[in-house]
Amino acid sequence: MTTPALPPAAGGNATTSPQRHGRLALMLLSPTFVVLALVILYPLIAALRESLYLKQDGLDANGFVISGDNFVGASNYSAIFSGETATRFWNAFFNTTFFTVVGVSIEVVLGVAMALVMHHALRGKGIVRASILVPWAIPTAMSALLWQWIFQADGIANQILNSQILWTTEGFQAKVAVLIADTWKTAPFVGLLVLAGLQMIPNEVYEAARVDGANAWARFWRITLPLVKPALLVAILFRVMDVLRIFDLPYVLIGARKSSVETLSMLAFDEASKLRYGPAAAYATILFLYVAIVAYIFVKLLGADLIGEARERTRNQRRRKAKATAEPEEKEAVPV
Amino acid sequence: MSAGARARTAALLAVAAVVLAGCGDDSSGDSGDSGAAPKLDGRGPITFATGKDTSGNMQKLVDKWNTDHPDEKVTITELPESADDQRQQMVQNAQVKSDAYTVLNLDVVWTAEFAANRWVVELPKDEFDLNNFLKPAVDTATYVDKLYAVPVYSDGGLLYYRKDLLTKAGVTEAPKTWDEMDQACKKVQALPEGKNIGCYAGQFDKYEGLTCNFSEAVQSAGGEVVGEDGKPNVNTQEAKDGLNFLVDGVKSGEIPKAAITYQEEPGRRAFQDGQLIFHRQWPYQFALANATDGTSKVAGKFDVAPLPGKDGPGVSTLGGHNFAISAFAKNKATGLDFIKYFSSEESEKSNLLATSQAPTRANLYDDQELITKFPYLPNLKASIEGAVPRPKAVKYGDVTAAIQEAAYGAMNGQKTTDQALSDLQSKLETLTAK
């Protein structure tokens, strides 16, 4: 970040170098900002706006639907939290949270185990890695159909367990079915990210530990886990955000409007399919807030150093560079 | 649960408080309604949005049309296989007022919604020979006494039964009542080869099929879901008897536990695998269960009969598809001609031969050549002519969800029959209140 190889500005007058930097940065970044505004900001605002409106309803004398939207303020939101709708909402909220907490926990344990296997496989590394990743490559709706076959009344799951469980009916077993299918599909994803982290750990650290007499268990807890933590946290964050908006798996595998597996996105979808876009947008906005809050807490509590570390690193680098070139750049060296 | 959403939005919902079967007396061709349908104009290439063309016969018919009408070519736009997804795509298309679809292949229960939202245009009644169509089918294509679509495919429930086992057990006739069916089952299950065979199944998973099966049970016990005056009427003894037929069946094991998970296909597999004595199913199963390529263990061993009821023959639910013209399409006149062509006797006959889908033209059911090929046609005609359509609701999605909620809850033992039906009654009342 020393003197930029810029031709002098058109005016050629005495703009100070930080200002010129800022303008250049803005220019270079603006396409990204425009795209982000279009694909993220606009839909968000549009959904928020939609959630404050309600389609006119009722039929006119000829049986036609009266068209037009009414501004209803926050009543789409307050309706969600009142009466029977509230029961349905909190049930979906619980299901979503349940799938997230339980599902991600299982996936992390299995994913780490898979990563260790992939990392240590001596022979056939390629095949082991490829085969573990196959479930991740299958589209969710497809895997839901596959598992539906497995879980049907006379399906293979019941044959193996020698049981007569009706997996796709209401009840706890439906939740279990969703968890199993979700784990099957996404544990490899966690495994892949953790594997990348494992490969970054230098061998010398293990050798040193071995010299110091640490057994395998201690090496795992004291070395592998702490060093793989950044990668693991990224994997968990991705998975948590993914499961919070889970839709296709329970929808295809178990079915619509089954309270045992109904999640927040399914509620939004159900409303939208009945042409009540206002309430649907309200559900979607609540889900968005939930995901945003969870992500924020996650980054603050667990992954604070995820971004912090990186920031620290750039800061140090810049300081070093600044000192080395001895230029008065420090003022703007701490961006954001 | 879903109950709440519906109860809350009750005030916003409207169900066409008109209509049920029988109200459509003037729907069969005689004009005289206030104001003729607006004229449809514009000729040129059009598109035909439909579900999957499983047999390839649609394409064949379209190809023939295209050879005869080189300037008004029709392109098939295949939508997803699931009915809900098809509706979703058509609704989205209508929301953005796109002219991408001209002719729409609508499920019979969507007609009211599409008509009330002005997504499809009114069709000129006098240009179709509606007198030659099955009356209940035509009724599904009308809304507030105006024609918005033309029925092309129909559907009615049939009772598939294992003739071989019944004969062996000394039962010579297909049961006409639920009691007779029950007794026939007991006799068959007493046979050595009848052990571990389930008695009866239909489509009992929580989806549209359950709405059909529940309505059939209620109607077959002499009740009604929504009355002729458009008012719900499920808190009656007849409705209780109907639902109890299903609830007690599950309790006693007469309906196998697994049937709670059955949609059409899992049920068909169970029947073809010889796991069921009686099966309520649509006509499409006939050809498949009779396949001799080894996929069906019951080929040649079964027959079909009209659905049984509480004290006599049962009453089927009406299924099928209607063709309509999108309000946002160009070349509507071509669309109209195409619908005429597709609903012609010749086209419907070729469809029946290729797909065994039930036609909507009455005389095809009496065609001796066709009866030889599809022996169930007379039974099917009786089934469809006596069939009751599902409620013609603009907010049909809410109505069917409420029905499924009630029936599924009762069959799973989460609610008593009385509770389920009184809940359903109050929910449907708020849904039908304007």
Image (cartoon, rainbow, N blue to C red):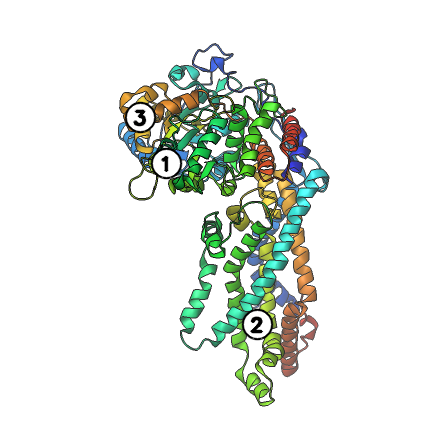
The x and y percentages for residue B153 are 40, 27
Decide if residue B163 is on the left or right side of residue A161: left
Residue B76 bears which disc, if any? Answer: 1
Q: Quadrant of the N terminus of chain B?
A: top right
Q: Which of the 4 quarters of the picture holds residue A298?
A: bottom right
Chain of the residue on which disc 2 is drawn:
A
Instruction: Indicate the secondary structure of the residue bearing disc 2.
Output: loop
Q: Residue at x 46, y 64 (%)?
A: A133
Q: On the picture, is B21 further left or further right than B103?
A: right
Q: Chain of mark 1?
A: B
The residue mark sitting in front, 1 or 3, is: 3
Quarter occupied by the C terminus of chain B: top right
Three-letter amino acid code at the position of disc 1: Ile
Q: Earlier in the sequence, mark 1 or mark 3?
A: 1
Q: Is residue A301 above or below residue B79?
A: below
Asked if both marks, 1 and 2, belong to the same chain, the answer given is no
Asked if the residues shown at circle 2 and circle 3 are in contact, with their CB atoms under 8 angstroms apart, the answer is: no
What residue appears at the point 49 percent right and 13 percent down from the top-left corner?
B25
Residue underneath mark 3: B349
Q: Does the rendering let one see residue A24?
A: no
Q: Where in the figure is residue B91, as x and y percent of width and height? A: 51, 35
Discs 1/2, front: 1
Pointer 2: what residue? A4
Residue closest to the eye, B56 or B223: B223
Same chain check for tags 1 and 3: yes
Q: Is residue B428 visible?
A: yes
Mark 1 falls on what kind of element? strand
